[in-house]
Image (tube, helix red, strand yellow):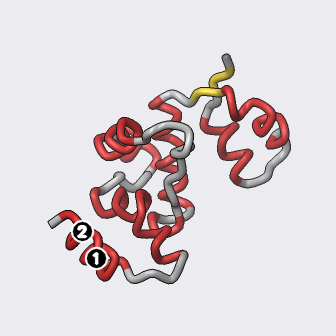
Amino acid sequence: MTVLDASAVLALVHDEPGADVVVDELRSASLGAANLAEVIGKLLFWCGEDKIIYGSETPIWHPQWALKAFSDFQIPQDLVDGYGYPQLTAQAKRKILGENLLRLHGMDVEATKTRLASRTA
């Protein structure tokens, strides 16, 4: 089993040397929570919460547990304080989990929320 660290994931994101090795290992690799915090922190710092989109292999399995884990996840305060990473706020999570994708497709976020809420009422 391969465990990727934050630098491997960021090499892939930035298409840096070694990215091809990361691609070869990606399907069977794991990423620990500490590394996830570092990757999310760097993405928030360098890209901002408006440019991050959550993705999963939803057609293969139901993602509810992963969505719950992400919703509950916080960047440890020592990383926020030590590296200046923004905290993963409720607003940032909403954007990452769906609002950014809606905007990318030209959809109105509030209109979509209203339409979905009317379906469950």
**Residue at 65 percent of width and 27 percent of height:** 29
Q: Residues within 10 Å of mark 1 (few under 14, many from 20)?
A: few
User: What residue is drawn where x is 28% and y is 70%?
Assistant: 116
Q: Mark 2, residues whose alpha carbon is within 10 Å: few (<14), some, or many (≥20)?
A: few
- Say which amino acid is labelled 1: Arg
Q: Is residue 15 left or right of residue 10?
A: right
Give the quadrant of the C terminus. Answer: bottom left
**Image spot of residue 94 (x, y percent):** 34, 61
Q: Residue 25 versus residue 38: which sits nearer the camera?
A: 25
Circle number at residue 119? 2
The answer to whether residue 76 is visible is no
Q: Could you tell me the amino acid type at mark 2?
A: Arg
Q: Which residue is pictured at 28% across the width and 76% down the height?
A: 115
Quarter placement of the N terminus:
top right
Q: CA distance from mark 1 to mark 2?
A: 7 Å
Nearer mark to the viewer, of 1 and 2: 2
Residue that carries the numbered disc 1 in the rendered image:
115
